[in-house]
Structure formats: C-alpha cells, structure tokens
Image: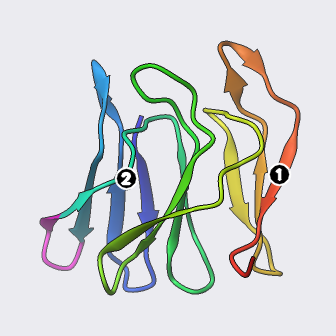
Amino acid sequence: MHTATVLKNSKVLITGGSIIVSLRSSELYDPSTELWTNTGSLNHERHKHTATLLANGKVLVAGGYDSNSILKSAELYDPPTGLRTKTGSMHSPRYDHTANLLENGKVLVFGGNVFGSSRSTVEFYDPLT
C-alpha cells in the first residue's frame, strides 16, 4: 500500500507502495492539470507506512515495511525544494499504523502491527525537536 497526502498547494504526494517488493518511488499529482511528476526517491523503500502533512508544509513519512523488515525510521519531504531528509526514528517499528497531526503541531502515531501482532503503543513526533 502506498500513501496519498494532499499538500497545501492542492497537489497530491504519492509515496511508497509495493509491487512484489517495497518501492522507494514518490510522485506528485496535480489535479488541476491531471499531470504526474516524479519527485525522486524516498530515503528508504516502504509500504504500509504513513505520510502526514505537518503545519510547516513538510510531510512526515514514517514506519512501514520494506521487503525484509518492519521500519521505525522516518523522513521528511519538503515540497518546495523536493528534498528529503532523515529525521528521528520512532521508538518502536510498526506498519499499518495511524499518524495524525494534532493542534499543537505534534504528530500522534498509534497502533499498527509487528509481524501480525497488534501494537497498542502511542508515540509523538515533534517537528521542533
């Protein structure tokens, strides 16, 4: 599974996914022109991850599963520059989780799976730290 995140400019960022193996791909879809643009590669291949639009306009791509392991790594995508940077990892690896932006600007990461076992833990990502 890939993610689709609506950006502040109304374009849609599509990240990751899988076709037998996990993908590093990332594309932008512009609904006004119906055009797709390749935005380069994620730092790490992943599917069943989350991609959350932050208050500063960047996108937090976190967790998921690559072709061999469950991920706790995270990266930031900056739409105006197209740059991707690694950011702090989660404490626990997880896939099929949720990640929601809170009013205070932090991201609540909850649940998910680890090899079929449900996770009941909660983590917070703070873009300021």
What is the quadrant of the C terminus in the image? Answer: bottom right
What residue did someone put label 2 on? 43
Residue 68 lies left or right of residue 94; in this view the side is left
> Is residue 31 or residue 107 the one in the foreground?
107
Seen in the image, is 10 located left or right of residue 72?
Answer: left
Q: Nearer the viewer, mark 2 or mark 1?
A: 2
First in sequence: mark 2 vs mark 1: 2
Tell me the quadrant of the picture where the N terminus can be found. top left
Q: Is residue 27 left or right of residue 14?
A: left
Q: Which residues are magenta?
A: 31-38
Locate residue 24: give its quadrant. top left
Q: Any magenta on residue 34? A: yes
Query: In the rendered structure, which amino acid carries the disc numbered 2?
Result: Asn
Secondary structure found at label 1: strand
Q: Tell me if mark 1 has few (under 14), some (14-19) or many (20+) residues whose alpha carbon lies within 10 angstroms of its own.
A: some
Residue 17 location, x and y as percent? 35, 37
Q: Secondary structure at mark 2?
A: loop
Q: Residue at x 57, y 47 (%)?
A: 73
Indicate the position of residue 93 as horizontal and vertical percent values: 68, 34
Residue 38 marker: none
Residue closer to the observer: 44 or 119: 44
Q: Amino acid at mark 1?
A: Glu
x and y, in percent, of residue 52 in the image: 57, 63
Q: What residue do we see at 60% from left, 76% from top?
A: 54
- Residue 128 picture quarter: bottom right
Q: Which residue is mark 1?
A: 123
Mark-to-mark CA distance, 2 and 1: 22 Å
